[in-house]
Image (cartoon, rainbow, N blue to C red):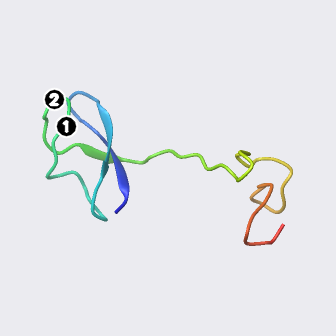
Amino acid sequence: MPIYEFRCHKCGHRFEKLCPMGETGKKMQCPDCSAPAPNRVMSGFCATGADGDSGGGSGCGPCSASSCGSCGH
């Protein structure tokens, strides 16, 4: 099950919830103000490599990662 991020249309509170695939939030309530149907929003993320590097360095190809399994570098 994925973790989705939601934002309350009434109070603006953002929260995450482990939900079934495709959950829209229509049957949920805001945990802060209990307003119905919070909006699902896009979540930001940051991935790091094994050495803690977040990419963007002296890498190969268009991804500029310092190491990747797809090209073997």
**Looking at the image, which residue is at 73% across and 72% down?**
70
Residue 6 to residue 63: above or below: above
As drawn, is 34 to the left or to the right of 49? left
Tag of residue 4 = none
Measured Cα–Cα span from mark 1 to mark 2: 6 Å
Q: Which residue is mark 1?
A: 30
For the C terminus, which image quadrant? bottom right
For residue 30, which quarter of the picture? Answer: top left
Badge 1 vs badge 2, beta-carbon distance below 8 Å: yes
- The image position of residue 43, as x and y in percent, is 44, 46
- Which element carries disc 2, helix, strand or loop? loop
- The image position of residue 65, as x and y in percent, is 76, 55
- The image position of residue 18, as x and y in percent, is 31, 53
Residue 66 to residue 43: above or below: below
Q: Mark 2 Cα within 10 Å, few/some/many (few <14, many 20+)?
A: few
As drawn, is 4 to the left or to the right of 11? right
Which residue reaches farthest front?
50
As drawn, is 19 to the left or to the right of 59? left
Q: Which residue is mark 2?
A: 33
Q: Amino acid at mark 2?
A: Cys
Residue 43 to residue 63: above or below: above
- The image position of residue 55, as x and y in percent, is 74, 49
**Looking at the image, which residue is at 70% across and 46% down?**
54
**Looking at the image, which residue is at 28% across and 57% down?**
19
